[in-house]
Image (cartoon, rainbow, N blue to C red):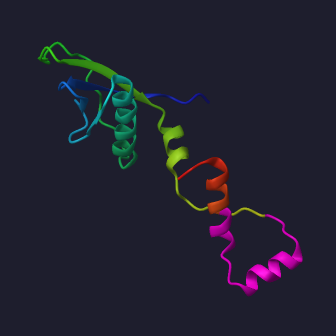
């Protein structure tokens, strides 16, 4: 089954320093970026965060004829794959089975090492995640 993109229009406003982004159909969902590319990526993140809390998404506006824009504004459709977004930011714990030498297990238990915490820290370090 192919994932469907979720698409909503947003108004991008250049204020001379950065691009402010306000979603037409997502009340209160806004962000900004120092460049168009950065603003678009930030808009995807803001939209994902906003929509992640909803069970039913609002219907996106597709007719822009009634929207008046200033000369420093434009409308862009912002898309996101919510399935991929949720996978990326899901903090639900999952169980993993692993093996270590017995001597290391005894030493770690003796020193009250939290195996899950150590594994998470090591994975983040190896993957370059802060």
- In front of the other: 57 or 27: 27
For residue 76, say whether it is visible.
yes
Position above or below: 7 against 46: above
Identify the residue shown where x is 29% and y is 30%. 59
Quadrant placement of the N terminus: top right
Identify the residue shown where x is 12% and y is 17%. 70
Compared across the picture, whether 17 is left or right of 46 comes to left
Q: Quadrant of residue 98?
A: bottom right
Find residue 22 and report its horizontal and vertical position in percent.
23, 32
**Magenta residues?**
98-119
Find residue 103 and report its horizontal and vertical position in percent.
87, 79
Find residue 10 and report its horizontal and vertical position in percent.
27, 26
Find residue 56 and report its horizontal and vertical position in percent.
35, 42
Dominant SS in magenta:
helix
- In front of the other: 104 or 6: 104
Q: Is residue 109 magenta?
A: yes
Residue farthest toward the right in the current orientation of the protein: 102
Q: Is residue 121 magenta?
A: no
- In front of the other: 33 or 10: 33
Residue farthest toward the bottom in the current orientation of the protein: 110
Position above or below: 32 against 72: below
For residue 94, say whether it is visible.
no
Position above or below: 53 against 72: below
Compared across the picture, whether 103 is left or right of 95 comes to right
Tell how many labels. 0
Identify the residue shown where x is 75% and y is 87%. 110
Compared across the picture, whether 94 is left or right of 8 comes to right
Identify the residue shown where x is 38% and y is 46%. 55
Compared across the picture, whether 66 is left or right of 19 comes to left
- In front of the other: 79 or 120: 120
């Amino acid at each position: 089954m192919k994932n469907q993109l979720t698409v909503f229009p947003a108004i991008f406003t250049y204020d001379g320093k950065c691009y402010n982004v306000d979603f037409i159909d997502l009340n209160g969902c806004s962000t900004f970026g120092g460049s168009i590319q950065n603003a678009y990526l930030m808009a995807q993140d803001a939209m994902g965060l906003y929509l992640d809390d909803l069970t039913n998404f609002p219907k996106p506006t597709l007719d822009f004829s009634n929207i008046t824009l200033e000369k420093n504004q434009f409308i862009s459709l912002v898309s996101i794959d919510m399935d991929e977004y949720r996978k990326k930011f899901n903090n639900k714990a999952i169980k993993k089975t692993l093996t270590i030498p017995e001597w290391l297990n005894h030493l770690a238990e003796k020193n009250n090492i939290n195996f899950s915490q150590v594994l998470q820290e090591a994975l983040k370090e190896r993957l370059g995640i802060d």
